Image (cartoon, grey):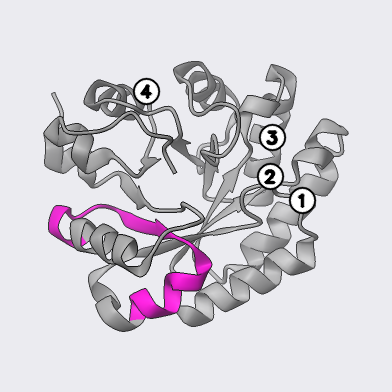
Amino acid sequence: MMTDNEILKHIDHTQLKPFATWKDIEKLCEEAIQYQTASVCIPPAYIKRVHEKYGEKINICTVVGFPLGYSVTSAKVAEIDQALADGCNEIDMVVNISDVKNGDFDKVQEEIRILKNACKGHILKVIIETCFLTEEEKTAMCKAVTNAGADYIKTSTGFGTGGATIEDIRLFKKHIGPDVKMKAAGGVKTKEDLIQFLEEGCDRIGTSSAVSMLQGTQKNEKDY
């Protein structure tokens, strides 16, 4: 059985509510430092302030093209450039889901490649928003993420109609390359869920509720 500390090292401690206050972000960061989570995942507008207050105490992750994914590639690159300048270390991007639904997988792969280059060696996680995709589209995205050289494939934004499922993680495992890791987000509701996703091979889990899950105090809220 995994210990709580082992679980927390795989958590991207997340606060992406559109109405998140500075007090909310401070609470997130203090918890991340106390419990030694893998990162905090925060809105781009808060990166600089968090970096100035907490410096190297905290690993900052942010989102790009979030949550709908249909920003043009140049806008996503500009978001990455600003995030890195402000002190971010990891980027969670959303693919252009319309391109995926149109079957234009080469275009999606090229955008991921461009954004990975823009990351300048920093980690890039690719959100494919599984709730909107067929199994064939998910499989194609596993290949696109792998071929583009991204670091992670990620299930969900938390803003869609559904979140991570064990079935999707098992599908990912079959079709991603050996250098691609997996991140589950959305739909992870209990400590048992955390353990199961990690045991299935996820390297990261994005959730706002990991601490409360482990303490048994979580509320049944939308997880983002």
Please name the residue shown 31% across and 21% down the image: 196
Amino acid marked by disc 4: Glu
Residue 200 marker = 4
Q: CA distance from mark 3 to mark 1?
A: 16 Å
On the question of residue 197 being in view, the answer is yes
Q: Which residue is under mark 1?
A: 70
Dot 4: element: loop
Foreground mark, 4 or 2?
4
Question: If the image is split into quadrants, where does the C terminus sit?
Answer: top left
Q: Nearer the viewer, residue 49 or 198?
A: 49
Q: CA distance from mark 4 to mark 1?
A: 30 Å
Residue 31 percent coordinates (x, y): 19, 56
Where does the magenta region start and end? Answer: 33-51
Amino acid marked by disc 1: Tyr
Residue 19 percent coordinates (x, y): 47, 57
Amino acid marked by disc 3: Met
Query: Is 47 one of the magenta-colored residues?
Result: yes
Q: CA distance from mark 1 to mark 2?
A: 21 Å
Foreground mark, 4 or 1?
1
Residue 141 marker = 3
- The correct choice, above or below, for 131 with respect to 76 in the image is above
Q: CA distance from mark 4 to mark 2?
A: 23 Å
Dot 2: element: helix
Q: Nearer the viewer, residue 178 or 69?
A: 69
Please name the residue shown 34% across and 44% down the image: 208
Taking the image as shown, residue 202 lies to the left or right of residue 8, namely right
Please name the residue shown 68% across and 73% down the image: 78
Of pointers 3 and 4, the one earlier in the residue sequence: 3
Of pointers 4 and 1, the one earlier in the residue sequence: 1
Q: Which residue is under mark 2?
A: 147
